[in-house]
Image (cartoon, rainbow, N blue to C red):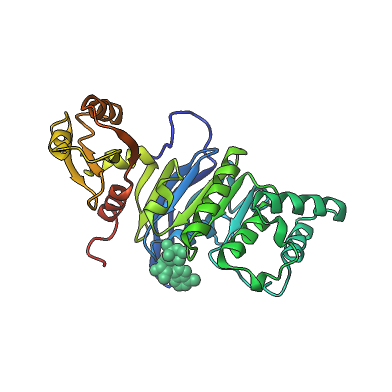
Amino acid sequence: MSSSTNGNSQRPVIEVDDVVHSFKGRRALDHVSFKVMPQSLHGFVGPNGAGKTTSLKIICTLLRPQFGIVKVFGHDVVDEQKMVRRKIGFMPDHFSTYRQMTVYEYLDFFAAAYGLPFAQRTRVIDEVLALTDMEGRKNDLISGLSRGMQQRTSLARVLVNDPDLLLLDEPASGLDPRARIELMEILKALRSMGKTIFISSHILPELAELCDAVTIIDKGKVMYSGSMSGLQASTNEHPTWRVTLGSEVDRIVDRMKGLHGVVDADQVEGRPEYRVSYDWTATDTNTLLRGLLDLGVPIVGFAEDKRHLNDAFMDLTTKGVK
Ligand SMILES: Nc1ncnc2c1ncn2[C@@H]1O[C@H](COP(=O)(O)OP(=O)(O)O)[C@@H](O)[C@H]1O
Ligand SMILES: [Mg+2]
C-alpha cells in the first residue's frame, strides 16, 4: 500500500506504525499504519466506529497505544509527550463545558493555560479571532453561538499556541453547507501559512475538494493511504467531468460518447449540462477537454464531478451497510 503523499523525501509530520488498540478486548485499531506529510491537508475518512477518534487521541497523546509506534515531528507520543503537545492543536468532536464563557474569556483561559503572559494574550487572541473570522464575536457567550461559530471558536482555541500541526476531529459535522464552506476556506488559509492539517470526516466528498491526501479507515484497518489522485486510480471508478454548454446542441451526447477514451456521457436534468466519464488508462482530462473543444460546442463550464469519489469510498469501506 502506498503511504507517501508526494514524491519528496521530507520527514513525515505524523508516522503511525502498526498500531493496535482494543477496548474491553474488542479491537478498535488493527495494525494501523500511515504517514502524513508536512504542509498537507490530509483527510482521515471512515464510517462511524471505524477508529478515527481513537487514532486522533493516540496521535495527540490523550491515549497511549497498546501496541505499535506513533511519532509526531519525529517525537514519540509516549516517551516525548511534552514535545508533541507543544507542536499540536487538537480539536475534539464535541464542544465540552465552558459554554457560559464569552469567546474572549474562553480563548484567554487557554492562552493562560499555555503560559502566555497577559500582554501577549490580547494580541494572540486578536490574531486567532482574525484568522477564524470571529472578530465581531469576542464578547458573545459561547452558548448563544451557532454550531458553525462554536466550531470556529474551538478552532481559534486550537490556534492559540500557534501549532504546526492541527488535528481536527469531524469539525464539519453538523454544519450547514455555508458554515462548512466557510470552515474549509479557513483551513485552506491555515495550510497556506505552512500548517499541516489532519482532518477526519465520515463523508469523503466533504474533504475531496480540500485535501491533497487521504487515509481511509474501516473497522480499524487502513484501506487506503496516499494522494487523492491515487485514490481515484486505485479504484475502478471513471473520472467524471461536468460539462456545461451555452445552449443545447443537437445529438451532443452521442458526439461526446464518440470521443477517444470516453466511456459514458449523459445529460443532467434537461439542462445543457452533461456528465462525461472517461477511462483514465486510455486518456486524460486535457485530452478530453481538447476533444470537446474540437466538437466546436460553446463550453461555459468544465468541472470535476466528485460523486465518483463517494462510490470509490463505498467500494473501499463496509459493503452492504445502508
Ligand atoms: N472509551 C471506549 N470504550 C469502549 N469502546 C470504545 C471507546 N472508544 C471507542 N470505542 C470503540 O472503538 C471503536 C472505534 O471508535 P472511534 O475511534 O470512536 O471511531 P470513529 O471516531 O471512527 O467513529 C468503536 O467500535 C467504538 O465503539
Ligand atoms: Mg469519532
Q: Closest to the observer: 100 or 83?
A: 100
- x, y percent for residue 287: 26, 26
- x, y percent for residue 60: 58, 55
> Is residue 248 visible in the rendered structure shown here?
yes
Task: Work out which quarter of the rendered image holds the N terminus and state it.
Answer: top left
Q: Closest to the observer: 32 or 151?
A: 151
- x, y percent for residue 303: 35, 40
- x, y percent for residue 257: 14, 36
Identify the residue at horizontal 54%, vertical 53% (top origin): 182
Identify the residue at horizontal 20%, vertical 37% (top origin): 249
The single residue placed furthest to the right in the displayed view is 119
Image position of 139 (left or right of 185): right
- Marks counted in the figure total 0
Ligand 1 is in which quadrant of the figure?
A: bottom left
Does 262 appear above or below 85? above
Does 35 appear above or below 8? below
Identify the residue at horizontal 69%, vertical 47% (top origin): 162
Image position of 8 (left or right of 157): left
Image position of 211 (left or right of 194): left
